[in-house]
Image: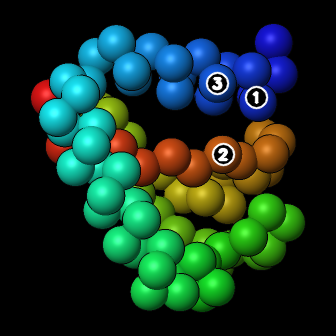
Amino acid sequence: MSLEEQLAQIREGSKKRIPEDKRAIIGKSMQDLRATGILDKTIKVGDTLPAFNLKNQNGEQVSSAALLAQGPLVLTVFRGHW
């Protein structure tokens, strides 16, 4: 399964997990952010990121350089819960 197909599944699954009223708030917030022009300043596909270290789900520091040495790197950020 391709990454695009996996992401589509995640989006579809979120429709079932996130209540409609919360999705409406998220949608409005996304529209408001887009209207600021912030997307013109974001990292694009193919851009080179600066090296970074983050904690993984186990609280262990992981470096982007170490992960990139193993192959392509996909970074996702999850914020909040419902």
* Residue 12 coordinates in the image, percent (x, y): 51, 18
Task: Look at the numbered disc 2 and give the secondary structure of its residue.
Answer: loop
Q: Is residue 79 above or below residue 4?
A: below
Among the two numbered marks 2 and 3 on one chain, the one whose residue lies closer to the N terminus: 3
At x 52%, y 27%, the residue is 11
Nearer to us in this view, 15 or 58: 15
**Residue position marked by numbered label 1 in the rendering:** 3
Q: Which mark is residue 57?
A: none
Residue 13 vs residue 79: left or right?
right
The residue under label 3 is 8
Q: Nearer the viewer, mark 2 or mark 1?
A: 1
Measured in 3D between alpha carbons, the distance from the residue under mark 2 to the one under mark 3, in whole angstroms, is 15 Å
Q: Is residue 44 above or below residue 35?
A: above
**Dot 3: within a 10 Å radius of its alpha carbon, few (fewer than 14), some, or many (20 or more) residues?**
few
Q: Is there a contact, CB below 8 Å, between mark 1 and mark 3?
A: no
Q: What is the spatial separation of the Cα atoms under label 2 and label 1, in whole angstroms?
A: 10 Å
